[in-house]
Image (tube, rainbow, N blue to C red):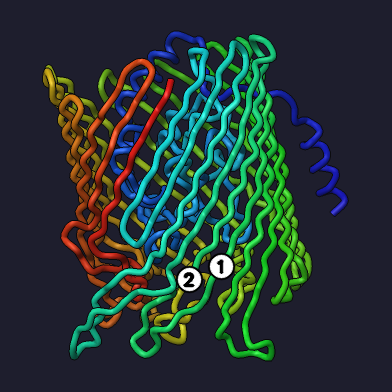
Amino acid sequence: MRSFLFLALVLSGSVWGQLDSVRLMSIPSVEIVRAIRKEITQTRVIEKDVIETLAPADVGELLQKLPGTTIRSYGAIGALKTVSFNGMGAQHSAILIDGFLTQNLLAGQINLSQIQVEGIGNVSLDDDQLKNRLLPVKSRLSGTTLLLGSGLLYKSREKGADLDINLGMGSFDTYDGGLRFKQSLDRSFISAFGYYRKSNGDFFYSKDNGVYSSIERRNNNRFEERVASIASGIDFSKTWSGRLRFAGKKIDQELPGAIILYNDYQDERMTTGELSADIDIAYNGNSNHVRSYYSGVLRETVYLDSTYLNQNGFLRNLYREQGHTIGYSSFHVFDQAKLETGASLGIETLFTEGVHLNDPLRATIAGFSRFEHNIGNWEVYYQLGVYIVSQHQLEGQRNYRRLMPRLKFLYSGARWLNSFELSNTYRLPSFNELYFGGIGNPNLIPENAYQFKYSLTKTIHKGKLRSVFDLWMNSSYVDNKIVAVPTKNMFVWSIQNIQKTLSGSFVFANKTTISLKDVALNTTINYQLQSVLDISDPESPTYLHQIAYVPIHTGSVDIGVKAQRVQMNVSNYFVGFRYVLNENIYENLEDGYFTTDISLKYTLLDDQKHRLSVQGLVKNVLNVQYAFIRGFVMPGRNYLIKLRYGLN
């Protein structure tokens, strides 16, 4: 333990200086390659105007429009949503907002329904586009990096104030409103964001018990959230800059649970309070670029079941998480090469009431070294990462050490890009997976994954036509994959290790734009074929069977038309069949579903000072009755109306 603390002090003592992470390096050849790459990877980017047109309820709904993603949704507004990329679990990905890592110490994965779309201006799934940005260490050690940009932590190019206000109302007695403000000066800026949403959430659904069908009401869905943040930044000089953000949120929600034929009553609720702070300092020289950063989060979650039968007559569990991370990232530019390094120290603690977990603590040192070499149209990346973890828990102290190599090749043509990658990623069980009441497993083994990725991207320009085609192939071998599996029955779950799994996926994506004089037509197509198979034991009844709740087919087709002030979008989303247990038999088969949303937006005013638009959205137009997770039914046809106003 002494050596661990000494190394922690050494690494934390070397944290100094950082770069505002959007500037390009000044090497002409690199700028040209980046321009080409940015153009041909647009299938992996969602811009602000598309986000506003789709008007998703949360980031989870938005990300299902990115290629290679699978969203697990446990219900309507506020219900848990998690994402996996290319068949890998959510914990093998890093989600960043404005260059800072989002954290959820208890769950180990981000609940996407608790990230508000109104605070997001763009989304990027392609870490090749991020290669000249200084990102937190974990993003370099993860299998996939997802970057969300709010625009609130960057100074506008022109001085002045920007104000955006939106108001909305919709089905299930839903009302929401948001405000974004930024004041940019010569060398500094200040910005603020606030959002409020309240929903009754109850809706009707069709229940079929095999003999007859009935229309029932989905209850216990009330949801209320408040979000606020304030940020500021300053350029100390031409080379030094700094940023600061404080944010908080409060969520109060009922938990409807699964619809079970023999027990349709639910009365659980959960409240979540969170405070976070993000700080960084940047140095941006001609050849040297350094970023130091701090991220801290305090989160309190209270779970209450008023009908739980114990000596108190109810169940109340409190989980109080605290996490602090300090780190640095840097790169040095050579003639035809670049050396990037980074290190971080993280401390995570969990305090509980109502459950006795002996307050586990986890200290993590992470680091990486990444060398990039350019030879003509070739770019080669060599990376070595390291995790050193000391964890104190009820069962005693456990230490983990892991080296993670990565090798990547890129070959760029005039209108196309080839990419090959071999990597190793590693992740520890989250506190939820270890200790959450009733389903946790303190004996879980860390998960170790080996991945191969290949992608081919090509663009076509012919007059007014621009089209981008993207093909991916991925394969992963995972030791001790951590999964949540139903055990006693379909609705009693536990966390387990699957000794060995083999996964593969094929992804096709296309984005096409046809620009005429007064009309623009946009289409986006995504399709994913994936398998995640249990290969642990040839004698097991689940050998070579698909893991539970991994759909073999997913896809989306969006069609948008913009004519002067009118914009219309038809959005279609498809999820194929999947199994609710790891044994792939007919009784465990869950049917696929297909949903359609239609959006119509009219711009009333758009000049140099004012922007005003009104939008109507009908979701699930065909009134499909469906659920991704068996028993967690989703709403049928519903509507949303949005009014947006902007002032420059």
Amino acid type, callout 1: Met
Residue sitting at 71 percent across and 54 percent down? Answer: 322
Q: Based on the displayed image, in which of its 4 quarters is residue 218 positioned? A: bottom left
Where does the image place residue 357, in percent across and percent down from the top left? 73, 72
Q: Work out whether 229 lies above or below 444.
A: above
Would you call the spot at circle 1 few (<14 residues within 10 Å), some (14-19), or many (20 or more)? some
Residue sitting at 37 percent across and 18 percent down? Answer: 35
Q: Which residue is mark 2?
A: 255
Taking depth in this image into account, of 586 and 156 the one nearest to the observer is: 156
Q: Based on the displayed image, in which of its 4 quarters is residue 393 positioned? A: bottom right
Residue sitting at 44 percent across and 44 percent down? Answer: 177
Q: Work out whether 221 lies above or below 56.
A: below
Q: Secondary structure at mark 1?
A: strand
Q: Which residue is mark 1?
A: 270
Where does the image place residue 350, in percent across and percent down from the top left? 71, 62
Q: Quadrant of the N terminus?
A: bottom right
Q: Work out whether 211 lies above or below 44.
A: below
Would you call the spot at circle 2 few (<14 residues within 10 Å), some (14-19), or many (20 or more)? many
In the displayed orientation, state which residue is furthest to the right.
2
Q: Work out whether 143 lies above or below 245.
A: below
Tell me, yes or no, if residue 47 can be seen here: yes
Residue sitting at 57 percent across and 79 percent down? Answer: 305
Q: Contact, CB < 8 Å: mark 2 with mark 1?
A: yes
Horizontal side of 271 relative to 40 (left or right) equals right
Marks 2 and 1, the one that precedes in the sequence: 2
Taking depth in this image into account, of 378 and 646 the one nearest to the observer is: 646
Horizontal side of 163 relative to 364 (left or right) equals left
Mark-to-mark CA distance, 2 and 1: 7 Å
Amino acid type, callout 2: Leu
Horizontal side of 92 relative to 415 (left or right) equals right
